[in-house]
Image: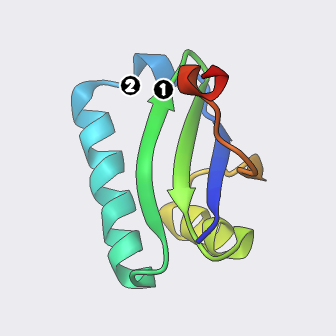
Amino acid sequence: MPKFIIERDIPDAGKLTEQQLKETSDGSCCVLNKLGPKIQWVESYVTANKVYCVYIAPDADMIRKHAQELGLPANEINQVTSIIDPTTAE
């Protein structure tokens, strides 16, 4: 199944409290449960004004549906074509 990187423009994302992050995570999990097992949230990275999320899903449309139901932006959705790390050089 394809893996996607989602870029979300969220002003002051880096200032979200632990409670706000927990509530967002809970909301995302509720929407994921509703959408079914074909979409999976792997992890997210919070920066000053953006959140980068890694998802596994059949297509970008399902990512958009999740974002819409959650009420968060999905400003850019990019399908991962390759993964590299230090072991790639070996």
Picture coordinates of residue 9, whole percent (x, y)? 67, 34
For the residue pair 83 and 5, the one nearer the viewer reads as 83
Q: Quadrant of the C terminus?
A: top right
The answer to whether marks 1 and 2 mark residues whose Cβ atoms lie closer than 8 Å is yes
Q: Residue 38, relative to residue 60: is it above or below?
A: below
Task: List the residue tagged with mark 1.
Answer: 46
For the residue pair 20 and 52, the one nearer the viewer reads as 52
* Colouring convention used in this rendered image of the protein: rainbow
Give the CA distance from mark 1 to mark 2.
9 Å
For the residue pair 35 and 70, the one nearer the viewer reads as 35
Picture coordinates of residue 19, whole percent (x, y)? 22, 34
Q: Residue 18, relative to residue 71: is it above or below?
A: above
Residue 65 seen? yes
For residue 16, the mark is: 2
> Closer to us: mark 1 or mark 2?
1
Tag count in the figure?
A: 2
Classify residue 63 as left or right of residue 43: right
Q: Amino acid at mark 1?
A: Val
Q: Residue, x 56% and y 15% (percent of image)? A: 48
SS state under label 1: strand
Q: Residue, x 64% and y 40% (percent of image)? A: 83
Point out the tag, 1 or 2, that comes first from the N-terminus.
2
For residue 77, the mark is: none
Q: Quadrant of the N terminus?
A: bottom right
Picture coordinates of residue 76, whole percent (x, y)? 77, 47
SS state under label 2: loop
